[in-house]
Amino acid sequence: MPLADEIKQRMLRAMKAKSAVEKEILRVALGEIQMGEARTGKAPTDEDAIAVVKKLVKSNEETLALAQDAAQKAALQEELDVLRSLLPQTLGPEKIVELLAPVADSIRAAKSDGQATGVAMKHVKASGAAADGKDVAEAVKRMRAPG
């Protein structure tokens, strides 16, 4: 099922369950996806929808970092949990280190962390695994650490 349709269904369930925070953040996500559809004139792909959700996650993380009020922080965290549940599961740094084992020598031999991360990202993408860039960078840092 396309992600946009999944969001619609979850929004309806949230309305019935009277889950205001979930309903509102799903409404925002759906609205952003539909605006993209209106701009391009074509139905959004799952990649388009995932990009919108990632943008909303990043925005909420930035707002959460600046939030002072406990109630606002709790609502933002709930929104983040809902948004993250829409994204494909990504590998954590530990799993990425395991995935990078075949290219570990190349990563350690790279002249800089940037080059090592480039080697790692290329291998992760070629494997078809989903991983966040920050987690890949963390895995590279662990692999290049002395000892």
Image (spheres, rainbow, N blue to C red):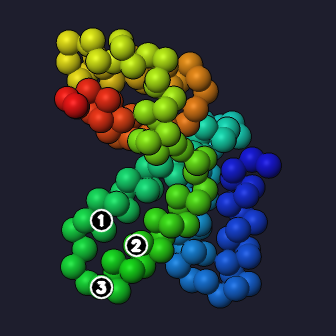
Q: Which of marks 1 and 2 is nearer the N terminus?
A: 1
Spatial CA span between label 3 and label 2: 10 Å
* Callout 2 secondary element: helix
Q: Do the residues labelled 1 and 2 touch (CB within 8 Å)?
A: yes
Mark 2 residue type:
Leu
Most foreground residue, 85 or 55: 85
Q: Name the residue under label 3.
A: 70
Q: Which of marks 1 and 3 is nearer the N terminus?
A: 1
Q: Residue at x 53, y 44 (%)?
A: 90
Q: Residue at x 51, y 48 (%)?
A: 52
Residue 106 point in image, percent of width and height: 36, 12
Q: What crowding class fits label 3: few (fewer than 14 Cα within 10 Å), some (14-19), or many (20 or more)? A: few
Residue 15 point in image, percent of width and height: 69, 81
Residue 99 point in image, percent of width and height: 51, 29
Q: Residue at x 53, y 24 (%)?
A: 125
Say which quarter of the image contains residue 22. Answer: bottom right
Q: Which of marks 3 and 2 is nearer the N terminus?
A: 3
Spatial CA span between label 1 and label 2: 8 Å
Circle on res. 76? 2
Say which quarter of the image contains residue 126. Answer: top right
Most foreground residue, 29 or 101: 101
Circle on res. 63? 1
Q: What crowding class fits label 2: few (fewer than 14 Cα within 10 Å), some (14-19), or many (20 or more)? A: many
